[in-house]
Amino acid sequence: MPGEAVTLQLGPYAGSAGAHWWGLQAAALRRPAEAAELRSSALLRPAQAPGGREIHAPRLVALELKGGAGALRTGDAGAEAPVTWNGAVAAYLERGPGGASAAREEAASGSAAARGPAPAPSPLAAAQDVPSGSHVQLWSHHLNVQLHPKSLYVIRQYMHDGDCGCLEAFAQGEGLLQDPSCMEELEDRLHYFVEECDSLQGFQVLCDLHNGFSGVGAKVTELLCDEYSGKGILSWGLTPALSSVAVSRQWESPRTRRCSRAWCRWDGSLGAGCNGWVLPLQDSQRNAYRLMNTALGLVHLCAHSSLFCPLSLSGSLGLKPQPPVTFPYISYDASLSYHSSAILAAALDTLTVPYRLSSSQGSILHLAETLNFSGRKVAAAWASVPFPALHGSSLPDALCAHQDVPWKLLASCRERKGSSCFAQSVVLRGLGKDRPSSSSPGRQPRSPLHACESTERVLQRYLHTAFPGAFRWVTWLQVWGHWELQGEGVWDNSVPLLPYSTSHVLEQPCYTPAPYPQFFSPRLSRQGFLLDQAPTSSPAAVESIPVLAALQSAPVLHTLLYGLYKDLQKLNPRRCASFFSAGVEQDDFQEALHKLRTLAQCYETELEADGSEEEADSD
């Protein structure tokens, strides 16, 4: 059985998604364990709390800036518990007379102090305390699990927030881990969690892409790749969503923009793609930094990871933002990290199922090898949160109710018309396995899906119909020693090795108690299923939801990567001199652009190749 994984959490937005993710796993642990389909030990470590109570803490190393961890930590790295830890877990979130809400307010004001171990929040307290999204400023405010004393490393050289002293550029992040003291701190914490694993399967890296943590992630994955060769490294590049208000204000046309000339100005240096109108210098520079951090982080994390997946609810990573992703049964505020990261956490908890299953031999490396052949080391994430199904209906009924797969792209790119992918890993959770069809005995099935004998077969047949190109076989050619993609036949000197498409069906839903936000439609039941009509009284809190999610190696990634490459070409380097003065050489940046374009070509189909040639001719 595959062993344990160590998670690295790099940056405030990655921390927000991680805090929600650990909360989802903690909620699942509070459920009856007789039918546990997922191994909690894959990501969590059992320990004894003061008083002998058993708890589970994430096997986690989290890097945060000064002021970004709230009440979790007030001292520097040397002020933590000694290495000779005896199994007890320190609880950093202190609860005062006013309960958890008071503790969060105290943490937000910066007056809280960690004064020693405290009991973990009880399920009752967690259920009664629903934080308001507008008041949740730090990921520690909605963290409801205990962390090991060696989990959190606060980087004192940079501030979490403010007008100066922030970690804004890729080179700043890289430079941090070139400091021997910082690298020693990271390695000490990393080795602690690795050495206690019985059988390490690999690493999960949650990393902010839009800020200087992209440089931190580049050095971290390089370290993991060098020191733990042969272990799987699955990296997730996270980017916050822009609110629709911010999008409309920033990118309205000159005719409809309601602002004075003092607020915005004309500049033709950015090219026609921006209509010539730009933000004030500070905001324009921040947007350029975001773009360059994203590109450099993507290229470097991809190079040192087994598989890399960008995750965001933003409509675009490029110069011209698009409206954020919408979900039919969720009403969320895209400007709140507390909201957007919660949706990504539900997707993460589902996408990582293949190497956490109790009944499977799958590992991080196996999942990566299903998707990363032919140089395609970037995967696109899709998710349906929640998966739309009527209470009591069957999976065939739910799937047949939609013309297209009812999921949304989480890769900051416009969705392509039609369905196409090279390979995929799909997980459906939260639907019972004992009622795959609602057809009456002796009656002709309403569809081929209704004729299937199990939910597993229903999903496999549905995916085969929706994505026929993903149901072939990867084979290993012993003569030449490289991956070769086979279609109908198999060569004499090759053997079937991996399917292009894998799927898993779980009965266990995604549990969503507080502090997970209650931003769901009133048409959802407690179990996250659709009601025939909205309740007349106040709707009950949604305790769990079904989720459908997938990782795909697909042509849509050409649109994402090549679009990012084209936007970077529009930037005027003279306007970004401060970015390069932080430590990025122009030649290194141009080399990264070349690698980005080469990576985009791995996902190119004939149609996209013709489009790229036409664009090149017009440049």
Image: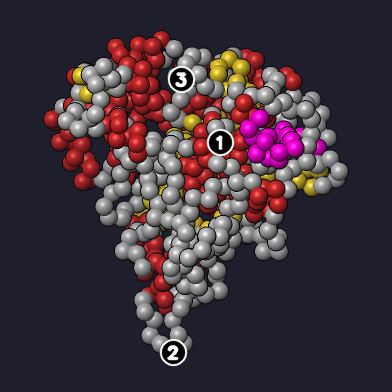
| Residue type, numbered disc 2 | Gly
Q: Which residue is mark 3?
A: 168
Q: Residue at x 55, y 36 (%)?
A: 135
Which of the marked residues, 1 or 2, is nearer the chain's N terminus? 1
Q: Which residue is mark 2?
A: 442
Q: Nearer the viewer, residue 609 or 40?
A: 40
Q: Residue at x 68, y 53 (%)?
A: 29
- Spatial separation of the CA atoms under disc 2 and disc 3: 66 Å
Q: Which residue is mark 1?
A: 136
Which type of secondary structure does the marked residue at label 2 adopt?
loop
Looking at the picture, how far across and down is residue 64, in whole percent?
Answer: 59, 26
Looking at the picture, how far across and down is residue 154, in whole percent?
Answer: 63, 23
Give, as a single range, the part of the protein colored magenta: 88-106
Mark yes or no: residue 491 visible: no
Which type of secondary structure does the marked residue at label 3 adopt?
loop
Q: Residues within 10 Å of mark 3 (few under 14, many from 20)?
A: many
Looking at the picture, how far across and down is residue 514, in whole percent?
Answer: 61, 49
The reply to whether callout 1 and callout 2 are in contact (CB within 8 Å) is: no
- Quick one: which residue is furthest to the front in this view? 537
On the rendered structure, is 251 left or right of 185? left
Mark yes or no: residue 35 visible: yes
- Quick one: which residue is furthest to the left in this view? 618
